[in-house]
Image: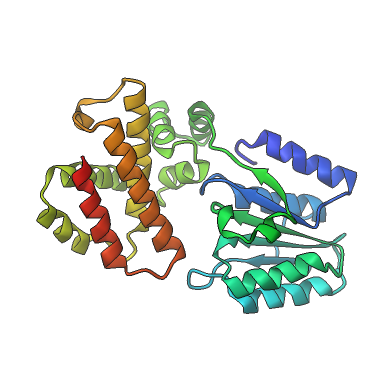
Protein backbone atom coordinates (compact mmCIF):
# COMPACT_ATOMS: atom_id res chain seq x y z
CA UNK A 1 0.00 0.00 0.00
CA UNK A 2 1.22 3.49 -0.88
CA UNK A 3 0.30 6.16 1.65
CA UNK A 4 -0.84 9.27 -0.21
CA UNK A 5 0.55 10.53 -3.53
CA UNK A 6 -2.56 9.48 -5.48
CA UNK A 7 -1.99 12.09 -8.19
CA UNK A 8 1.62 10.97 -8.71
CA UNK A 9 0.63 7.31 -8.79
CA UNK A 10 -2.13 8.00 -11.32
CA UNK A 11 0.43 9.67 -13.62
CA UNK A 12 2.75 6.66 -13.34
CA UNK A 13 -0.02 4.14 -13.99
CA UNK A 14 -1.07 6.04 -17.12
CA UNK A 15 2.53 6.02 -18.36
CA UNK A 16 2.76 2.28 -17.80
CA UNK A 17 -0.59 1.62 -19.47
CA UNK A 18 0.28 3.73 -22.51
CA UNK A 19 3.62 1.93 -22.82
CA UNK A 20 5.30 5.24 -23.60
CA UNK A 21 7.74 5.46 -20.75
CA UNK A 22 10.33 8.23 -20.71
CA UNK A 23 13.89 6.95 -20.53
CA UNK A 24 14.33 8.69 -17.17
CA UNK A 25 12.10 9.91 -14.36
CA UNK A 26 13.02 12.27 -11.52
CA UNK A 27 11.08 11.89 -8.27
CA UNK A 28 11.74 15.10 -6.34
CA UNK A 29 10.55 16.35 -2.96
CA UNK A 30 11.51 16.43 0.72
CA UNK A 31 12.87 13.30 2.37
CA UNK A 32 10.70 10.67 4.08
CA UNK A 33 7.74 11.23 1.74
CA UNK A 34 7.86 7.73 0.24
CA UNK A 35 9.48 8.60 -3.11
CA UNK A 36 11.69 5.50 -3.10
CA UNK A 37 8.73 3.35 -2.06
CA UNK A 38 6.72 4.64 -5.02
CA UNK A 39 9.70 4.02 -7.34
CA UNK A 40 9.92 0.38 -6.22
CA UNK A 41 6.17 -0.09 -6.59
CA UNK A 42 6.27 1.41 -10.07
CA UNK A 43 9.01 -0.96 -11.19
CA UNK A 44 7.02 -3.83 -9.65
CA UNK A 45 4.04 -2.72 -11.73
CA UNK A 46 6.16 -2.70 -14.90
CA UNK A 47 7.71 -6.10 -14.12
CA UNK A 48 4.48 -7.72 -12.87
CA UNK A 49 6.54 -8.89 -9.87
CA UNK A 50 7.25 -7.46 -6.43
CA UNK A 51 10.90 -6.42 -6.63
CA UNK A 52 10.90 -5.53 -2.94
CA UNK A 53 10.62 -9.20 -2.05
CA UNK A 54 12.85 -10.85 -4.63
CA UNK A 55 16.10 -10.02 -6.41
CA UNK A 56 15.43 -9.45 -10.11
CA UNK A 57 18.09 -9.73 -12.83
CA UNK A 58 16.62 -6.83 -14.80
CA UNK A 59 16.54 -4.40 -11.88
CA UNK A 60 19.40 -2.29 -10.48
CA UNK A 61 19.23 -0.35 -7.21
CA UNK A 62 21.93 2.21 -6.44
CA UNK A 63 22.44 4.18 -3.23
CA UNK A 64 25.31 6.31 -1.93
CA UNK A 65 28.49 4.60 -0.79
CA UNK A 66 30.08 6.63 2.02
CA UNK A 67 27.87 9.65 1.31
CA UNK A 68 28.29 9.71 -2.46
CA UNK A 69 27.41 7.74 -5.56
CA UNK A 70 30.65 7.00 -7.33
CA UNK A 71 31.45 6.73 -11.01
CA UNK A 72 32.16 3.00 -10.65
CA UNK A 73 28.54 2.47 -9.60
CA UNK A 74 27.23 4.36 -12.64
CA UNK A 75 29.60 2.50 -14.97
CA UNK A 76 28.29 -0.78 -13.61
CA UNK A 77 24.74 0.52 -14.13
CA UNK A 78 25.51 1.43 -17.75
CA UNK A 79 26.93 -2.05 -18.29
CA UNK A 80 23.83 -3.70 -16.84
CA UNK A 81 21.49 -1.55 -18.90
CA UNK A 82 23.36 -2.40 -22.09
CA UNK A 83 22.49 -6.09 -21.65
CA UNK A 84 19.34 -7.66 -23.02
CA UNK A 85 16.54 -7.91 -20.48
CA UNK A 86 16.29 -11.40 -19.00
CA UNK A 87 12.61 -11.89 -18.10
CA UNK A 88 11.04 -8.48 -17.53
CA UNK A 89 9.59 -6.37 -20.36
CA UNK A 90 12.46 -3.88 -19.89
CA UNK A 91 15.42 -2.97 -17.72
CA UNK A 92 14.89 -0.66 -14.74
CA UNK A 93 17.05 1.17 -12.21
CA UNK A 94 16.40 3.29 -9.13
CA UNK A 95 19.05 5.75 -7.93
CA UNK A 96 18.27 6.76 -4.36
CA UNK A 97 19.52 10.22 -3.27
CA UNK A 98 20.70 10.76 -6.81
CA UNK A 99 21.93 14.26 -5.92
CA UNK A 100 24.84 12.57 -4.11
CA UNK A 101 26.39 11.46 -7.39
CA UNK A 102 29.82 13.05 -7.65
CA UNK A 103 30.69 15.08 -10.74
CA UNK A 104 32.27 12.15 -12.58
CA UNK A 105 29.27 9.92 -11.84
CA UNK A 106 26.82 12.55 -13.10
CA UNK A 107 28.73 12.98 -16.37
CA UNK A 108 28.79 9.22 -16.81
CA UNK A 109 25.04 9.00 -16.21
CA UNK A 110 24.45 11.85 -18.65
CA UNK A 111 26.17 9.85 -21.37
CA UNK A 112 23.91 6.88 -20.60
CA UNK A 113 20.84 9.10 -20.83
CA UNK A 114 22.00 10.63 -24.09
CA UNK A 115 22.74 7.27 -25.72
CA UNK A 116 20.25 4.67 -24.44
CA UNK A 117 21.18 1.24 -25.80
CA UNK A 118 18.21 -0.81 -24.60
CA UNK A 119 14.63 -0.32 -23.55
CA UNK A 120 15.00 0.82 -19.95
CA UNK A 121 13.74 3.28 -17.39
CA UNK A 122 15.97 5.01 -14.85
CA UNK A 123 14.32 6.59 -11.81
CA UNK A 124 16.27 9.25 -9.93
CA UNK A 125 15.05 9.91 -6.38
CA UNK A 126 16.20 13.20 -4.87
CA UNK A 127 15.35 15.80 -2.24
CA UNK A 128 17.93 18.19 -3.73
CA UNK A 129 17.41 18.06 -7.51
CA UNK A 130 19.24 21.38 -7.94
CA UNK A 131 22.48 19.51 -7.24
CA UNK A 132 21.97 17.48 -10.40
CA UNK A 133 23.36 18.71 -13.69
CA UNK A 134 20.71 20.74 -15.57
CA UNK A 135 21.37 18.52 -18.60
CA UNK A 136 20.40 15.46 -16.54
CA UNK A 137 17.23 17.08 -15.22
CA UNK A 138 16.25 18.19 -18.73
CA UNK A 139 16.34 14.55 -19.86
CA UNK A 140 14.03 13.41 -17.08
CA UNK A 141 10.30 13.68 -16.66
CA UNK A 142 9.98 15.23 -13.22
CA UNK A 143 7.30 14.07 -10.81
CA UNK A 144 7.11 16.17 -7.66
CA UNK A 145 6.07 14.80 -4.28
CA UNK A 146 4.61 16.88 -1.46
CA UNK A 147 3.97 16.43 2.29
CA UNK A 148 0.71 14.71 3.20
CA UNK A 149 -2.07 16.14 5.32
CA UNK A 150 -1.96 15.46 9.06
CA UNK A 151 -5.35 13.76 9.00
CA UNK A 152 -4.27 11.32 6.29
CA UNK A 153 -1.24 10.22 8.33
CA UNK A 154 -3.29 10.15 11.53
CA UNK A 155 -5.94 7.87 10.02
CA UNK A 156 -3.30 5.57 8.59
CA UNK A 157 -1.56 5.20 11.96
CA UNK A 158 -4.89 4.40 13.64
CA UNK A 159 -5.46 1.70 11.02
CA UNK A 160 -2.08 0.26 12.04
CA UNK A 161 -3.08 0.09 15.69
CA UNK A 162 -2.05 3.47 17.10
CA UNK A 163 -4.30 5.08 19.69
CA UNK A 164 -6.05 8.26 18.50
CA UNK A 165 -3.93 10.41 20.84
CA UNK A 166 -0.63 8.85 19.74
CA UNK A 167 -1.64 9.01 16.07
CA UNK A 168 -2.48 12.70 16.45
CA UNK A 169 0.83 13.49 18.18
CA UNK A 170 2.91 11.59 15.62
CA UNK A 171 1.07 13.08 12.64
CA UNK A 172 1.69 16.57 14.03
CA UNK A 173 5.38 15.88 14.66
CA UNK A 174 5.95 14.31 11.25
CA UNK A 175 4.95 17.45 9.30
CA UNK A 176 3.45 15.46 6.45
CA UNK A 177 6.37 13.01 6.08
CA UNK A 178 4.87 9.49 6.26
CA UNK A 179 8.28 7.81 6.44
CA UNK A 180 9.15 9.75 9.57
CA UNK A 181 5.71 9.07 11.05
CA UNK A 182 6.19 5.33 10.55
CA UNK A 183 9.68 5.52 12.05
CA UNK A 184 8.18 7.12 15.15
CA UNK A 185 5.31 4.64 15.39
CA UNK A 186 7.37 1.49 14.86
CA UNK A 187 10.14 2.63 17.19
CA UNK A 188 12.92 3.27 14.67
CA UNK A 189 12.95 6.87 15.87
CA UNK A 190 11.00 6.97 19.13
CA UNK A 191 8.61 9.66 20.26
CA UNK A 192 10.56 9.91 23.53
CA UNK A 193 13.79 10.58 21.60
CA UNK A 194 11.95 13.30 19.71
CA UNK A 195 10.72 14.88 22.93
CA UNK A 196 14.22 14.74 24.43
CA UNK A 197 15.77 16.45 21.38
CA UNK A 198 13.14 19.21 21.46
CA UNK A 199 13.63 19.68 25.20
CA UNK A 200 17.39 19.99 24.64
CA UNK A 201 16.83 22.57 21.93
CA UNK A 202 14.60 24.71 24.14
CA UNK A 203 17.22 24.58 26.91
CA UNK A 204 20.02 25.47 24.47
CA UNK A 205 18.13 28.60 23.41
CA UNK A 206 18.18 29.79 27.02
CA UNK A 207 21.81 28.99 27.77
CA UNK A 208 25.06 30.91 27.05
CA UNK A 209 27.42 30.04 24.22
CA UNK A 210 29.80 28.06 26.46
CA UNK A 211 26.96 25.68 27.36
CA UNK A 212 26.05 25.22 23.69
CA UNK A 213 29.63 24.36 22.73
CA UNK A 214 29.73 21.81 25.54
CA UNK A 215 26.47 20.35 24.25
CA UNK A 216 28.10 19.67 20.88
CA UNK A 217 30.44 17.21 22.59
CA UNK A 218 27.44 15.27 23.92
CA UNK A 219 25.83 14.84 20.50
CA UNK A 220 26.01 11.40 18.87
CA UNK A 221 28.77 10.70 16.35
CA UNK A 222 26.05 11.08 13.71
CA UNK A 223 24.17 14.26 14.73
CA UNK A 224 21.85 14.48 11.71
CA UNK A 225 18.85 12.69 13.32
CA UNK A 226 18.87 15.22 16.18
CA UNK A 227 19.29 18.17 13.82
CA UNK A 228 16.38 16.97 11.69
CA UNK A 229 14.16 16.73 14.76
CA UNK A 230 15.09 20.35 15.55
CA UNK A 231 14.28 21.29 11.97
CA UNK A 232 10.81 19.73 12.15
CA UNK A 233 10.14 21.31 15.51
CA UNK A 234 11.17 24.79 14.36
CA UNK A 235 9.06 24.46 11.23
CA UNK A 236 6.03 23.55 13.30
CA UNK A 237 6.88 26.41 15.71
CA UNK A 238 6.94 28.90 12.84
CA UNK A 239 3.60 27.63 11.54
CA UNK A 240 2.08 28.04 15.01
CA UNK A 241 3.45 31.56 15.33
CA UNK A 242 2.20 32.63 11.92
CA UNK A 243 -1.25 31.37 12.92
CA UNK A 244 -1.07 33.03 16.36
CA UNK A 245 -1.15 29.67 18.15
CA UNK A 246 2.27 29.70 19.85
CA UNK A 247 2.36 27.85 23.18
CA UNK A 248 4.01 29.00 26.41
CA UNK A 249 7.10 26.86 25.92
CA UNK A 250 8.03 28.83 22.82
CA UNK A 251 7.00 32.24 24.13
CA UNK A 252 9.57 34.90 23.30
CA UNK A 253 10.86 33.33 20.08
CA UNK A 254 9.81 35.66 17.26
CA UNK A 255 8.94 34.43 13.74
CA UNK A 256 11.86 36.32 12.15
CA UNK A 257 14.33 34.75 14.55
CA UNK A 258 12.86 31.29 13.98
CA UNK A 259 13.06 31.81 10.23
CA UNK A 260 16.73 32.79 10.43
CA UNK A 261 17.71 29.84 12.60
CA UNK A 262 15.72 27.54 10.32
CA UNK A 263 17.74 28.72 7.34
CA UNK A 264 21.03 28.18 9.17
CA UNK A 265 19.90 24.76 10.40
CA UNK A 266 18.87 23.74 6.89
CA UNK A 267 22.26 24.80 5.54
CA UNK A 268 24.06 22.90 8.30
CA UNK A 269 22.11 19.71 7.56
CA UNK A 270 22.64 20.16 3.83
CA UNK A 271 26.41 20.53 4.16
CA UNK A 272 26.73 17.65 6.60
CA UNK A 273 24.76 15.42 4.22
CA UNK A 274 26.31 16.42 0.92
CA UNK A 275 29.72 17.95 1.53
CA UNK A 276 32.95 16.87 3.19
CA UNK A 277 32.83 19.59 5.86
CA UNK A 278 34.37 19.84 9.32
CA UNK A 279 31.51 18.61 11.49
CA UNK A 280 32.69 20.39 14.65
CA UNK A 281 33.01 23.75 12.91
CA UNK A 282 29.61 23.35 11.23
CA UNK A 283 27.94 22.63 14.59
CA UNK A 284 29.75 25.49 16.32
CA UNK A 285 28.55 27.87 13.60
CA UNK A 286 25.02 26.60 14.19
CA UNK A 287 25.28 27.27 17.94
CA UNK A 288 26.59 30.77 17.23
CA UNK A 289 23.53 31.47 15.09
CA UNK A 290 21.26 30.84 18.11
CA UNK A 291 22.30 34.27 19.39
CA UNK A 292 19.88 35.74 16.86
CA UNK A 293 16.99 34.79 19.15
For the N terminus, the quadrant is: top right
Answer with the quarter of the image where residue 239 lies: top left
Residue shown at 77% from the left, 77% from the top = 79
Expressed as whole percent of the image width and height from the top left, the position of residue 207 reads 11, 47
84 above or below 193? below
Q: Nearer the viewer, residue 282 or 157?
A: 282
Residue shown at 69% from the left, 47% from the top = 142
Looking at the image, residue 269 sits to the left or right of residue 126; the answer is: left
Answer with the quarter of the image where residue 247 lies: top left
Asked if one can make out residue 263 in the rendered structure from this viewpoint, the answer is yes
Expressed as whole percent of the image width and height from the top left, the position of residue 65 reads 53, 72
34 above or below 147? below
128 above or below 82? above
Expressed as whole percent of the image width and height from the top left, the position of residue 70 reads 58, 75
30 above or below 239? below
- Which color scheme does this rendered protein use? rainbow
Asked if one can make out residue 97 in the rendered structure from this viewpoint, the answer is no
Residue shown at 59% from the left, 54% from the top = 129
Q: Nearer the viewer, residue 55 or 259?
A: 259
Looking at the image, residue 290 sits to the left or right of residue 191; the answer is: left
Amino acid sequence: MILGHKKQWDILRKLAKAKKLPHALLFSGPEKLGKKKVAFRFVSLLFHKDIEKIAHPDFVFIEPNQREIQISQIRELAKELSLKNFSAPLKAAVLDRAHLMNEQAQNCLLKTLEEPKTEAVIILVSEHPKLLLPTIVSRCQTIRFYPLGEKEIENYLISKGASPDKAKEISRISLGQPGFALDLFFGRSGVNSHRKAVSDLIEIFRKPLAFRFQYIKKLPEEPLPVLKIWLRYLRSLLILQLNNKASEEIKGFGPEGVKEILETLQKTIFFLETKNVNKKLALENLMLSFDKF
